Image (cartoon, coloured by chain):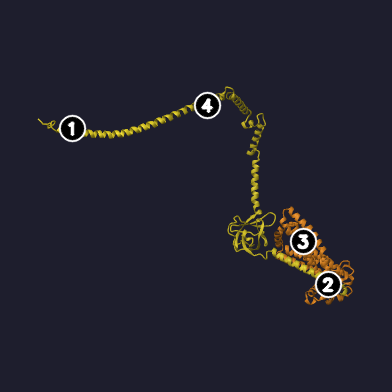
Amino acid sequence: MPASPALPERRSTLLHELLRHARSWGHMLHVGSVVLVLALSPGSYTPEFRRRTAQHIYTSTWQVMSWFTALAALLSLVVIRIVVVTALSYGLSQYALQMVVRVLVLELIPLCAALFVALRAGMAFNAGAVGEADKQPSAQRALDLVHLQTHLAPRVLADAFAVLALATLSSVVVLVLAYLTVYGFSPWGLAGFTRTVGQVFDLPVSLGFFLKTLFFSLAVAVVPLAASLEAEPKRASDTIQPGAVRLLLVLFLLEALSLAVKYI
Amino acid sequence: MTSPLTPETTPALRHIERRANWLLMLIAGLVAGFVLYVMVARGVFESTQQLVLISDDSEGVIVGMDLTFSGFPIGRVRRIELAADGMARMVVDVPHKEAHWLRTSSIFTLERGMVGDTRIRAYSGIMSDPPLPPNSERTLLRGDTSAEMPRLIASARALLENLETMTATESPLNASLGQLKTTTERMNGRYGVLSGVMGSDDQAKKIIQTLERANSLLTKAEQRVFDKGGVIDNTQATLISSKTALDQLQSVLSDSRNTLKNVDAVLAEAQAVGTNVRIASADLGVLRAEVEASLRRLSQLTDEINRKWPFARDTEIKLP
């Protein structure tokens, strides 16, 4: 019977794959925690470390901040206009502002910032920025702490900061645009607008917003790095960048978790 | 790959570092500002007084909901709790600067619409009443649209039944409309509205005849009154003669006035005569008194002579 020897083989393959995934996730968490510890250690902040971090912040945030903000403002303006006009046509204009703040500031802007930075960071890692591709897999598994501290931790910090910076800046721009769309240039709507923002940002929502953006930034900074470190030479030629699927999965899991906690 | 730092790249790196620092400061400022703004928006820095609203049902009320006055938010629900007596207690924070809108006579309503969220409103009818003291407890009046629906449907059904009764074939409304139709048909007839009002053409015809007769009567009366030799002319002649008579009367009266003046003068003279007579009468009295006195003296003198000789005589009377 040809099927009987294939079944154990398939089982062992499945088991092997599961173990590999578990190891991979473990490796990712390990790398993430090590990088976080390195980033939070005061001893890491040498002049060289600061210089490298500043360089990466310049690359990952400064260079893209203006046009990402402009793009986010344009898309937000379209969404704000649609929401406001629709709410007006249904006689629900008093809820338009709340909806704009909830949809854009709380949900879409942090997700867009995270995806954008992930794309750039992943491309950078894929381009060989890690500098580990020429090493043997066994050498990669044993983390080179010096290399992590001097080269990778600044990059991780810069990527995490990029997500926070882009999300914060775009959120502020969206709030200003929402005010201008609803009230125009009149200052008399400021009290009502402030009150609406206050109603949206109660303590659980504010905390959820902060934690979600923080975890987004950590995921975007750590997942591609861990995947690149883990990538084997035979997979280095893959067209898909390492860790992309996992990063998307982590981001959407975080988003789903945030939505579930807030609205269920 | 990161390249080692070289002296040539140092100025550029310094420039990059400066920008990165600016960026860090900008984002830190934005985050701090946003946190501060949200705290202000949540009313963290406002000094508030507490108001407790009590209702038998707090459905739809959520923490953070506004208490509005004339459409303006003046307070925010801070806590909702279930009291020991089973009533819902809604603790509302009212900023001190807005508390003057609430008076002791203010009423509070909880309104639930078919669409949209629940609203808590405050109404202050008499603004001259004393302000609402802190920690006051007030009952929340409920205005629930969905609860009103059954009553509304029952009223609508009764209304429709009434309407059906009114529009039935034998209904008074239908009969009235039929009569109205008859009336309007009559109004469209030969004698117009008059037929409609009088009920038939014959009656209308009588009215018209009466009017014609009244017209001819008026014509005749006009002739009698205003034509030549009519009542008006006679009256005018009478008035003219009366005027002449009045003129004559006026002259007679003036003559009479003169005569009366003469009579007045005569009377004045008579009055003077009367005065003289009165004086003369007074002198006559004195004269009479003097004459009487002279007569009495003469009588005494005569008596004296008689008692004297030769005229003396016995005057004694002897009885038989």
Q: Chain of mark 4?
A: B
Farthest residue, direction top: B229
The three-letter amino acid code for the residue at tag 3 is Val
Locate residue A263, reporting x and y percent.
73, 62
Q: Residues within 10 Å of mark 2 (few under 14, many from 20)?
A: some
**Relative to A209, B305 lies left or right:** left
The answer to whether mark 3 and mark 2 are in CB contact below 8 A is no
Amino acid type of disc 2? Arg
Tell me the element at label 3: helix
Q: CA distance from mark 2 to mark 1?
A: 186 Å
Question: How far, Cα to Cα, is label 4 from label 1?
Answer: 85 Å
Per the image, label 1 sits on a secondary structure element best described as helix
Q: Which chain is yellow?
A: B
Mark seen at residue B14: 2
Q: Badge 1, how many Cα within 10 Å: few under 14, some, many 20+? A: few
Quarter holding the C terminus of chain A is: bottom right
Q: Amino acid at mark 1?
A: Thr
Q: Amino acid at mark 4?
A: Lys
Up/down of B192 relative to B80, above or below: above
Q: Quadrant of residue A144?
A: bottom right
What's the mark number on residue B243? 4
Residue B224 visible, this orientation: yes
Q: Position of residue A118 (x, y in %)?
A: 82, 67
